[in-house]
C-alpha cells in the first residue's frame, strides 16, 4: 500500500515538468476538458509533434511498437498533467486505436500507421456510433460489402469527434448482415480523404463540434481490414479499458480557479471565502475531485496489476463524468448571477470557464457508453445480478 | 498509487471474518441488544484473547505492533457483523495513549486493555461541550455539562478530555467509573451501541483524577479525527454488508415472474450503492495510510469522514428500499445494520463541519492557477 504519488513517481513527474514547461506547450494551452472536439490550431499541431518527437505520444505504448512502455498509472499521470494545463488532447488514436493496431493489426498496418501516430502526423477519429446504434452499438448498420479484394462502404456514422482533426477513420462496419449481431462486424482503417466520404459538422450546446460522416460507395482495399473479417467486435471491446483512463485534472483546475475567486476580496475587503457556506462548498468540491482521482488511480493500478477491472472501469467512467456536472454546478451556484456570463465575456468570473464546463457537462455522461450501460455492468458483472431482459424489436431482428 | 493489502493483512481479515461469523449470530446480537449490553461478555473476552484491542501496542508490551491501517481493516470486519463491540474505543484509547508517550499511568491503562478491561474515551463534539479541570481545596475535579460516552456504562475507567481555554490545551484525565464524583446513566439510542450519560457531580468529594497528559487543542482535534477515521472503517464494513444483503435479496425475491434484481431500476440503485461504498473504502484507506505513516493527513481525514458520512445515508436509503418489507422487520439482520449505519454516521460529527474544515484546509493548500502535480514536484526540489 502506498498513496504518496509525488514520492512514488518523483522523477517521472520531473520529466513531465521538464517537457511541459516549454514555449510550445504554453502556446498550445487553452483547451478544455472535452476531448478531441475542437479544431486543432497550428500551435496545437506543433506541440503534439514536439511530444511525438520527444517520444511522449507513445507513453503507454509497448516498446516493440515504438512506445515508452509506461504503466497505466504513469500514463494517467501524464494525461492528468496535460489536462490540468489545458493542453490539446492526444486523441483516441493514442488512447486505444494505436494499442489495438499493435495488438490486432497486420505487420504492414503496424509499420504503416504506428510510427506516424507516435510522431503526431497520423491522427484517428473513431467512427462507431450511428443514428440507430448508440448505447446498443451492436445494432450498427453501415454496410461494408466485400467485392473481390475490396470493400465498398455505404451508410452513415454520427457523433464522431475529432473528424476535423483526423487523417484516418477507425471504422466499424457490418460485413455480414446474416450473422448474429456481434458476429458480422469488421474494423477498417479508412483515410479521411477517400472518395465518397462527406463530413457534416454537428454544433452543440458548447464549443464542442462533433460530426456526421456519410459514406457513399466508398471503395477501400482489403488491406484496410484490421484483424479477421467479421471479428471486429472482439477488438472493439478489448480496447476499452485504457480508454477509460480519464484524467480528472480539468475539473481540479477549475476548482483551483474557484478557490482563487473565493480568496479575492471585494472593495470592502470581504472575500467570498470569509463565509462558512462558501468554505463548505469548496470543501465539497475538493472532496469530489479527490474521490474521483482515487477511482481513476485505482483503475490504473488494477490494469498495471493485471487484475480484472470491468467494474472499476465502469465506476471510474461514471464518477469521472458525473464529476463534471457536480463541479460546474456547485461553482456556478457559488458565483450566482455573475455565473451566467459566458466564456470570455467581460467580467465573467473564472473567465466563464465554469459556465462553459456546465454547458459541456452532460456530453461525457452520454459518450463512451452511456452511464446507464456502465451501471448495468456494475450490477450484472460486479454484483452478479441477472441480466435484464432485452426486448429485441422486429426491425433489429431483420438486421 | 498502490492499493494492495499485504498477505498478512489478508490472512488476518480472513481469520477475523471466520471467527466473527462463528461467534456472532443474528439471534445472539438481538439478545445482546435486548439486554442493552452491546455484545455478549464471553464473546468479547474471546476477542480480547485474540489480542485485537491491543493490536496497536508494540509486541514487547503485549500487543501485536499493528498499524492504524491494520486496525482499520480489522474494524471493517467487525463492522460487517453489525455487532457493537468496544474494539473501536479500545483501539482509539491505545492510539491516544501511545501518542502521548511513556508514563506509568498510561502503561497501567494499556496493560488493563490487554487483559480485557474496558476503558471508555469521551469525545465531546466541539470545544464548548468539553468539561474542564478545576482546582479544588483537596484535589482538582472535573466540571462541566453531562457528556455522552460510548461504553461509559460498562467501562471500568473513563478517559475524559478537559479543556483549558486560556492555554488552549486539553488535559487528558483518567477517571474511575466508580468514583463518587461522577454519575453514569444508560441512554437509549438509535442503534445497539451502548451509550451512557456521564454527569460530573461537583458536590461530592471526588477522588483526584489522574492526569494522563496535556496536548494542544489542535492535537486533540487530530486525535478525534483518528477516532472518526477508525469509525469510518467500521461503518464502511457495515455498508458493504448492507449492499451484499440487498443484492442477495433482490436475486431471489421474485415479482412479476422474475427476480426483482433483474429490473434495471433496482440494478442501477445497487450500482450506485456499490460506488458509494467504494468511495468510502478508498478514501478511508487513503487517509488512514497517510495518518499511519506520519504524513500530514488532516485534509484526507476530513475528506474520508465526509465521504463515509455521505455513503452511509446513500447506501442505507437505497438498500432499505430494495430489502422491501423484510428489511424493516427485526427478523432481518439488515434492520440492525440500517440503524447502526445512522448511529455511527452521527457519531462521526456533522458532515457540514467536515466540509468547512476541508474548505479551509484546501484553500490553504491549493496553489494559484496553473500548477499541476509536476510543477509541484519541481518546486519541492
Image: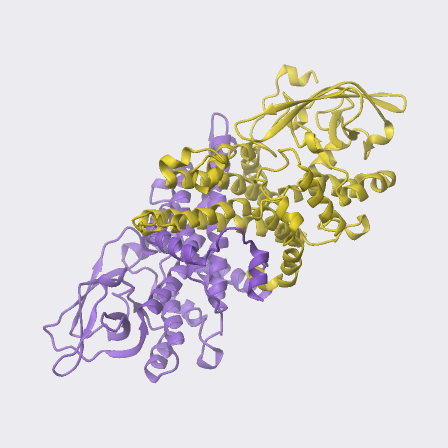
Chain colours: A yellow, B purple
Residue B360, x across and y down, in percent: 38, 56
In this rendering, would A315 be left or right of A182? left
Query: Looking at the picture, does residue B40 appear above or below residue B60?
Result: above
Residue A191, x across and y down, in percent: 79, 29
Outermost residue to the right:
A148
Residue A203, x across and y down, in percent: 58, 25
The residue at 27%/79% (across/down) is: B211
Query: Looking at the picture, does residue A210 appear above or below residue B5?
Result: above
Q: Quarter holding the N terminus of chain B?
A: bottom right
Camera-side residue: A393 or A16? A16
Camera-side residue: B301 or B257? B301
The residue at 52%/61% (across/down) is: B13
Q: Quarter holding the C terminus of chain B?
A: bottom right
Camera-side residue: B41 or A200? A200
Is any atom of residue A57 visible in this view?
no
The residue at 63%/50% (across/down) is: A76
Q: How many badges with numbers are in the image?
A: 0
Residue A23, x across and y down, in percent: 65, 50
Quadrant of residue B364 within the rendered picture: bottom left
In this rendering, would A15 be left or right of B4? right
Query: Looking at the picture, does residue B1 appear above or below residue A374?
Result: below
Is any atom of residue B163 visible in this view?
yes
In this rendering, would A379 be left or right of A332? right
Quadrant of residue B198 within the rendered picture: bottom left
Amino acid at each position: 500500500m502506498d498513496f504518496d504519488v509525488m514520492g512514488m513517481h518523483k522523477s517521472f513527474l520531473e520529466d513531465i515538468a521538464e517537457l511541459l514547461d516549454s514555449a510550445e506547450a504554453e502556446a498550445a494551452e487553452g483547451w478544455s476538458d472535452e476531448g478531441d472536439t475542437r479544431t486543432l490550431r497550428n500551435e496545437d499541431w506543433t506541440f503534439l509533434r514536439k511530444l511525438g518527437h520527444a517520444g511522449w505520444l507513445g507513453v503507454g505504448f509497448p516498446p516493440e511498437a515504438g512506445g515508452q512502455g509506461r504503466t497505466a498509472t504513469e500514463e494517467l499521470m501524464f494525461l492528468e498533467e496535460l489536462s490540468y494545463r489545458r493542453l490539446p488532447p492526444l486523441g483516441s488514436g493514442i488512447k486505444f486505436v494505436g494499442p489495438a493496431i499493435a495488438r490486432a493489426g497486420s505487420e504492414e498496418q503496424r509499420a504503416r500507421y504506428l510510427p506516424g501516430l507516435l510522431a503526431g502526423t497520423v491522427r484517428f477519429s473513431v467512427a462507431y456510433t450511428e443514428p440507430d446504434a448508440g448505447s446498443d452499438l451492436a445494432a450498427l448498420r453501415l454496410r461494408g460489402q466485400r467485392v473481390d479484394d475490396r470493400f465498398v462502404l455505404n451508410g452513415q456514422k454520427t457523433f464522431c469527434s475529432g473528424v476535423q482533426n483526423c487523417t484516418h477513420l477507425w471504422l466499424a462496419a457490418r460485413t455480414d448482415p446474416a450473422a448474429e449481431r456481434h458476429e458480422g462486424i469488421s474494423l477498417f482503417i479508412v483515410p479521411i480523404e477517400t472518395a465518397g466520404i462527406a463530413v457534416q459538422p454537428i454544433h452543440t450546446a458548447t464549443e464542442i463540434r462533433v460530426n456526421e460522416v456519410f459514406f457513399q460507395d466508398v471503395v477501400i482495399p482489403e488491406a484496410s481490414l484490421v484483424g479477421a473479417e467479421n471479428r471486429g467486435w472482439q477488438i472493439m471491446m478489448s480496447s476499452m479499458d485504457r480508454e477509460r483512463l480519464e484524467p480528472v485534472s480539468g475539473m481540479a483546475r477549475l476548482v483551483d480557479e474557484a478557490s482563487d475567486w473565493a480568496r479575492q476580496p471585494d472593495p470592502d475587503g470581504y472575500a467570498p471565502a470569509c463565509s462558512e457556506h462558501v468554505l463548505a462548498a469548496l470543501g465539497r468540491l475538493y472532496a469530489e475531485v479527490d474521490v474521483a482521482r482515487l477511482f481513476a488511480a485505482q483503475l490504473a493500478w488494477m490494469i498495471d496489476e493485471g487484475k480484472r477491472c470491468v467494474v472499476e472501469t465502469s465506476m471510474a467512467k461514471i464518477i469521472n463524468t458525473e464529476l463534471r456536472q457536480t463541479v460546474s454546478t456547485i461553482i456556478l451556484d457559488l458565483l450566482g448571477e455573475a455565473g451566467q456570463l459566458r466564456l470570455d465575456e467581460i467580467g465573467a468570473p473564472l473567465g466563464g470557464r465554469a459556465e462553459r464546463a456546465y454547458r459541456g457537462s452532460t456530453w461525457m455522461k452520454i459518450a463512451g457508453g452511456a452511464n446507464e450501460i456502465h451501471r448495468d455492468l456494475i450490477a450484472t458483472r460486479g454484483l452478479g445480478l441477472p441480466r435484464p431482459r432485452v426486448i429485441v424489436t422486429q426491425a433489429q431482428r431483420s438486421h | 498509487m498502490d492499493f494492495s493489502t499485504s498477505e498478512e493483512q489478508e490472512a488476518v481479515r480472513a481469520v477475523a471474518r471466520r471467527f466473527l461469523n462463528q461467534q456472532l449470530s443474528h439471534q445472539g446480537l438481538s439478545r445482546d441488544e435486548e439486554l442493552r449490553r452491546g455484545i455478549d461478555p464471553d464473546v468479547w473476552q474471546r476477542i480480547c484473547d485474540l489480542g485485537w484491542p491491543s493490536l496497536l501496542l508494540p509486541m514487547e508490551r503485549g500487543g501485536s505492533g499493528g498499524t492504524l491501517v491494520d486496525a482499520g481493516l480489522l474494524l471493517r470486519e467487525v463492522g460487517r457483523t453489525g455487532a457493537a463491540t468496544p474494539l473501536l474505543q479500545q483501539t482509539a484509547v491505545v492510539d491516544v495513549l501511545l501518542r502521548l508517550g511513556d508514563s506509568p499511568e498510561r502503561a497501567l491503562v494499556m496493560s488493563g486493555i490487554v487483559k480485557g478491561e474496558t476503558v471508555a474515551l469521551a469525545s465531546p463534539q466541539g470545544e464548548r461541550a468539553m468539561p474542564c479541570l478545576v482546582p479544588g481545596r483537596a484535589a482538582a475535579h472535573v466540571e462541566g455539562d453531562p457528556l455522552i460516552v460510548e461504553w461509559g456504562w460498562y467501562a471500568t475507567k473513563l478517559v475524559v478530555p478537559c479543556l483549558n481555554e486560556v492555554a488552549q490545551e486539553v488535559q487528558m484525565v483518567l477517571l474511575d467509573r466508580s468514583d463518587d464524583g461522577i454519575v453514569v446513566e444508560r441512554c437509549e439510542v438509535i442503534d445497539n451501541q451502548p451509550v451512557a450519560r456521564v454527569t460530573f457531580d461537583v458536590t461530592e468529594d471526588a477522588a483526584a483524577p489522574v492526569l494522563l497528559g496535556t496536548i494542544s487543542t489542535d492535537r486533540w482535534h487530530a486525535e478525534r479525527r483518528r477516532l472518526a477515521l477508525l469509525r469510518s472503517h467500521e461503518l464502511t464494513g457495515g455498508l458493504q454488508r448492507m449492499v451484499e444483503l440487498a443484492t442477495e435479496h433482490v436475486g431471489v425475491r421474485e415479482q412479476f415472474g422474475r427476480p426483482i434484481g433483474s429490473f434495471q431500476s433496482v440494478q442501477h440503485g445497487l450500482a450506485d450503492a456499490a460506488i458509494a461504498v467504494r468511495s468510502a473504502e478508498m478514501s478511508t484507506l487513503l487517509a488512514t495510510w497517510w495518518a499511519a505513516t506520519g504524513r500530514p493527513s488532516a485534509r484526507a481525514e476530513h475528506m474520508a469522514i465526509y465521504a463515509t458520512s455521505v455513503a452511509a445515508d446513500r447506501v442505507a436509503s437505497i438498500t432499505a428500499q430494495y430489502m422491501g418489507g423484510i428489511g424493516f422487520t427485526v427478523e432481518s439482520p439488515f434492520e440492525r445494520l440500517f440503524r447502526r449505519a445512522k448511529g455511527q454516521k452521527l457519531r462521526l460529527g456533522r458532515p457540514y463541519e467536515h466540509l468547512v474544515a476541508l474548505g479551509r484546509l484546501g484553500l490553504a493548500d491549493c496553489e494559484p492557477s496553473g500548477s499541476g502535480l509536476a510543477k509541484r514536484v519541481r518546486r519541492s526540489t
